[in-house]
Image (cartoon, rainbow, N blue to C red):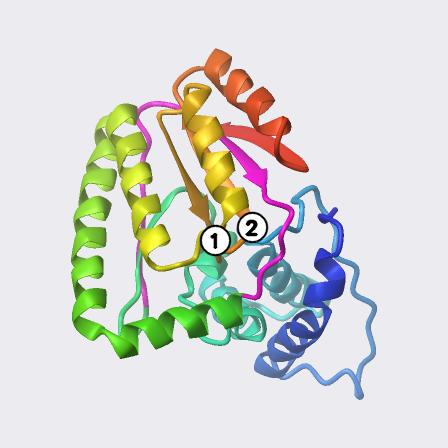
Amino acid sequence: PAIPGYKVKKKDEANVAIQNVLTHLKFDVKERGMVVTFGGDLCAVSGIGSSAAQVVSLARGLGLATSLPLSDDEINAAGYEGEKGYHGTPSGIDNTASTFGGLLKFQRTDGDPIFTKKKISNPIRIVYASTGITASTIQVVADVRALKEANPEWFDGLMGRYLKILEQGETAVDTGDMELLGKMMDENHVLCQELTITCKESEDLVLAARQAGALGAKMTGTGRGGLVIALTPTVEIQNKVESALKNLAPQVWKTSFA
């Protein structure tokens, strides 16, 4: 499943991503043909990580179909190469989440990334909604890089604020403090506004979610479209936020994890 227009707009990037995985795994379709069908219930929409899900599942599927003994780390590495087709210079967070699952703390480094699985003390209930806009990650990343290069001191200051938000957000997850986690989501969204990666549609959804009782709400993913995610403390408020967002968004989903 996908939002309207997503697969058409992403087709060229998808072709590059698929070829990247094949090349990385040294799989030559001229020597051995194959038919690949992608399926599942994850809706392809900007911000959900569907590109990572695609390339990671391709790598894992190739390993199973050809009896190639791939470890999770090798699958993750192939997924990272695939993500370059969609993102140009991916952080690695999406393919890592797709490969290993769970709630992760992820840190990019000059070498291999550092990631740890987090344990959740209280259930986390979320609602996420699509703006209906499919943005180009490559273009948005390039624009943010240009801002950074034009004003490095401003960008360093923003990153300092982000690290403080991250620290408090991790504490909130560890202690089950959903109110603090929601507040950090709101503050993170402010940083996204300053990075110029929000849009009117995402701002309207964030405001509606908060007004309906969400503890916090923010854009997620590439930005300038894509998704908004809202944190809800109870099933009742989760349903209320879902109803409120359905009045504005073309697609709305809800889930929870513990």
Which residue type carries mark 1? Gly
Residue 20 vs residue 238: left or right? right
The location of residue 231, given as percent across then percent down, is: 41, 29
**Cα separation between marks 1 and 2:** 7 Å
**Mark 2: secondary structure:** loop
Asked whether the residues under the numbered discs 1 and 2 touch, taking CB atoms below 8 Å apart as contact, a structural biologist would say: yes
**135 magenta-colored:** yes
Is residue 195 in sight in this rendering?
yes
Residue at point 30% right, 51% down?
191
Horizontal side of residue 70 vs 32, given as left or right: left
Q: Name the residue at 49% across, 41% down.
A: 228
Q: 201 or 86, which is in the foreground?
A: 201
Q: Quadrant of residue 26?
A: bottom right
Q: From what the image shows, is residue 135 above or below residue 189?
A: below
The earlier-in-sequence mark between 1 and 2 is 1
Q: Is residue 250 above or below residue 175?
A: below
Q: Report helix, strand or loop for mark 1.
A: loop
Q: Is residue 258 visible?
A: no
Q: Name the kind of residue labelled 2 in the image.
A: Gly
Question: Could you tell me which residue is drawn at 72 percent across and 85 percent down?
Answer: 28
Residue placed under numbered mark 1 in the picture:
221
In the image, is 183 to the left or to the right of 230? Answer: left
Q: Return the residue nearer the eye: 248 or 109.
A: 248
Instruction: Work out whether residue 205 or residue 35 is closer to the camera in this orientation and state it.
Output: 205
Badge 1: how crowded within 10 Å, few (<14), some, or many (20+)?
many
Magenta-drawn segment:
113-136
- For disc 2, the marked residue is 226
Picture coordinates of residue 18 (x, y %)? 67, 73
